[in-house]
Amino acid sequence: MATVRIMTPEDIDAVSDLTARIFGDPDEYEITSDLLKSAYHECPFMPPDLCWVGEEAGRIVVKWQILDLEMLVAGVPIRMGGIQAVAAEPDANHKGYAKKVALAALPQIKDRGFDFVLGFAKRGAFYRRLGAVVVAAENEIEIEVAGIPRLREDIFRPWVEQDDLATVLQMYNQLQPMATGPLVRSTDLWPWLLRRTHAIWICPAGYIGIVESPGEMEVREVVGQGSAFHEAALRKLGALAREKGIRRIKAVLPPNHPLVNCMMTYGFEMQTIYSRKAGCIGLALAPVRLIGRLRDVMDSRLANSTHSNLSVELNLEGPDEIDQIRLNEGGQSLRKLNLKLSSGALLQLALGHLSIATLLEQDPSASLEPHDADTLDLLDTLFPIGHPFMPHADRY
């Protein structure tokens, strides 16, 4: 049986070798292994003490790395553990070692102040057995270039990374004030975003980022302010596609993105995939604590709603947590709510992935007092359903 422990600096070579062999392309083993070794020595977001290993007979047979990142939740920077996939030696598979490592690590991750861990999985069965839930949908958009009006005045220029990076990062962090899903980017993080967008066009109001391949163009980021910017951005994308002879532009954006609203004038196709087993998955560690960090957001939502005259006492209960959150304490009348949900349901509620009504129906452990239409409407105000989304450049 494997012994679980935190990785030490002496384990870096063995862990990098294991990960590169299991997840890397055989032709890119050296590149992948060297990149991992470099990250362990230099990347502040991939600390060795957030890597747990399983050791058997003096050999590391499984490892699980967590990244130390900040993610926006309703515009609030929240410390989040980024899941790197479990890597195990082939002869160690199906022995329960990966689960043993994760179960040993998760309480320690929680004690270090992480409220949840989040990752992306093509097959999420392993994480679902640990209690993980899907917390975001995937959106795939296509628009015919022929339907996009011609660009009249080109306000964009190709970026120069050494000159424009600080501006791009500032725009990215500031121009999505209530978003859920994007990472908080910095000059320290940028070199370690392996999917970062290199083809960027910038103007004073914002920027667009695309990925090109033969005969295809995919929009990865559009960040800016105002309908005029997004109209200009769409026309610029059309012009770039025409230069390459591309007839359809693909985009990976949330359905509430301003560029998507702009596309409605010209027509487009969108597929939204709500998976229950794969994609963006989250494992709740302290979801009640997470919701407590959103107190100011909930106060603002309440103050700007038809319930602004209420003072709310929200008593939250999860499997291992209980907390009372007081909102709008100067309200004219007091409303007391008692809400009990599973950890996964609380995380989905906090991130705005599913509505309170859906969660109450799907969660057999759930309860709400009082359970009436007014209470459901009030909770919809505090936890509105949204479109949590992490851009591909932020993914790991």
Image: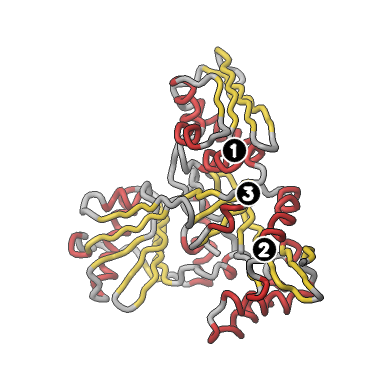
Extreme top residue here? 333
Q: For this rendering, which residue is in front, 186 or 100?
A: 100
Secondary structure type for disc 1: loop
Give the residue drawn at x 32%, y 54%. Answer: 271
Task: Tell me the quadrant of the picture where the N terminus can be found.
Answer: bottom right
Up-down relation of residue 30 to residue 204 (above or below): below
What's the mark number on residue 116?
3
The mark that comes first in sequence, 1 or 2, is 2
CA–CA distance in space, label 2 to label 3: 19 Å
From the image, tell me which residue sits under label 2. 98
Tags 1 and 2 touching, CB below 8 Å: no
Tag 3: amino acid = Phe
Mark 1 surroundings: few (<14), some (14-19) or many (≥20) residues within 10 A? many
Tag 2: amino acid = Ala
Task: Tell me the quadrant of the picture where the C terminus can be found.
Answer: bottom right
From the image, tell me which residue sits under label 1. 342
